[in-house]
Image: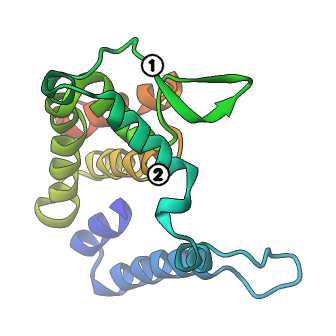
Amino acid sequence: MAYWVAARKKMGIAVSLLCLGALAATGWFALFGAESKTSSNVYVFERLLQTSAKDEQRYLEVELMFEDMETATDRWLGKGFGSRFWSCVVIEGESLALSPHIALLTTWYKGGILTFLAVIVLPVAVCLWRLIGSGGPPLQLASGASVLMYVLLSSLSGGWHFPNLFTYGAFLALSERSVTEFP
């Protein structure tokens, strides 16, 4: 996506359309799969249409997490970064979870809505603005796209482990730097 944004400004309409076509083809393949003997019959799009979100364990897990945030102080300032909550998903015999499977919400649980807005929502808005609107150097755009990729992936499952958070922080820092600051 970042390459498409950079290409449309520097290389003209033909390269821009080629990159956009490749992006669209990748998205189409991810949603609908390939009709071949080796591919699975369960595609993302079909699963989304056939599954009710309320029937998923991840949805119930998020409900349990928010139920654990009993007071207004818990909702605004969080439960603390060492906190755990009872989860319906038992992993290795443990029903206390450090983070829900929709890991993006962990920031809200542990640091409250203020931390969630500052650490997740604001950086996403800034990176999205740069990618769509204002532009910037290609490395800065690619780092912004990586921030958005982290948010997308941690909205689906996982993302609260150290390597994921470290790369999120690193790409967030790189997306804020001017190109003259890079070696």
Q: Which of these two is toward me, 124 or 5? A: 124
Residue at 35% over, 69% down = 4
In-image side of 158 versus 149 (left or right): right
Q: Is residue 26 above or below residue 62?
A: below
Q: Where is residue 148 in the image (x, y as percent from the top left)?
A: 34, 51
Residue at 45% over, 19% down = 84
Residue at 30% over, 74% down = 11
Going by the numbered disc 2, the residue's amino acid type is: Tyr
Q: Where is residue 154 in the image (x, y as percent from the top left)?
A: 45, 44
Q: Is mark 1 on a helix, strand or loop?
A: loop
Q: Residue 59 carries which label?
A: 2
Q: Is mark 2 on a helix, strand or loop?
A: helix
Per the model, the C-alpha gap separating discs 2 and 1 is 17 Å
Within 10 Å of disc 1 (Cα), the crowding (few <14, some 14-19, many 20+) is some
Within 10 Å of disc 2 (Cα), the crowding (few <14, some 14-19, many 20+) is some
Q: Which residue lies furthest to the top in this view?
A: 82
Q: Which residue lies furthest to the right in this view?
A: 37
Locate residue 176: give its quadrant.
Answer: top left
Q: Which of these two is toward me, 142 or 54? A: 54
Going by the numbered disc 1, the residue's amino acid type is: Arg
Q: Which of these two is toward me, 36 or 95? A: 95
Mark closer to the chain start, 2 or 1: 2
Residue receiving disc 1: 84
